[in-house]
Amino acid sequence: MFFGSKPYDDFLNFPEWGFLVRIVTFMLAIIGMLAFFSLVPTRETSYTKEGKYTLIAYLLHGFFIRGMRAFDLENIHLGFPGFIVLALASILLTTVLASEPVGKVYNKIERYFLGNKNKTKPTYNG
């Protein structure tokens, strides 16, 4: 529903409400984004280093989401212990994908495919 990949008539038992539900969902998403951006610091802080590779984590997490969809894991009912394990696994995955080693490997791959082999610094925040 939140990815915009489902047709309007899949939202409710009344397909004519699907458009309204999607508009409300998009409006809530915009409000959420604005709320998030109001929390983003505009100066360097103690945790700025941890945020250096978050774009890479964002770009790479889609492969894991697609893998979960390919194995139809979104229909598994985990219960509370499974939810806790999933939350911890998500935190671990985010930490690994946003780590400096993954960022450096990603940077090398990016430079190879974009043809910037002589560039030594990442093309993002660094």
Image: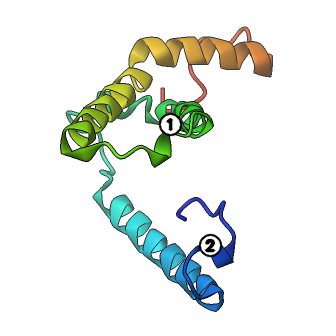
The picture quadrant where one finds residue 39 is bottom left
Q: Amino acid at mark 2?
A: Asp
Q: Characterize the local packing of mark 2: few (<14), some (14-19) or many (20 or more) Cα atoms within 10 angstroms.
A: few
47 vs 74: above or below = above
- Which of the numbered marks, if any, corresponds to residue 55? 1
The picture quadrant where one finds residue 14 is bottom right
The residue that appears at 35% across and 60% down in the rendered structure is 36
The residue that appears at 31% across and 29% down in the rendered structure is 89
- Which of the numbered marks, if any, corresponds to residue 10? 2
34 vs 54: above or below = below
Mark 1 to mark 2 CA distance (whole Å): 32 Å
Q: Nearer the viewer, mark 1 or mark 2?
A: 2
Residue 124: horizontal and vertical position, in percent?
55, 31
Residue 42: horizontal and vertical position, in percent?
33, 51
The residue that appears at 54% across and 38% down in the rendered structure is 65
Q: Amino acid at mark 1?
A: Leu
53 vs 118: above or below = below
Q: Characterize the local packing of mark 1: few (<14), some (14-19) or many (20 or more) Cα atoms within 10 angstroms.
A: some
Side of 66 where 54 appears, left or right: left
The picture quadrant where one finds residue 54 is top left
Instruction: Name the foreground residue: 45 vs 56.
Output: 56
The disc, 1 or 2, on the residue closer to the chain's N-terminal end is: 2
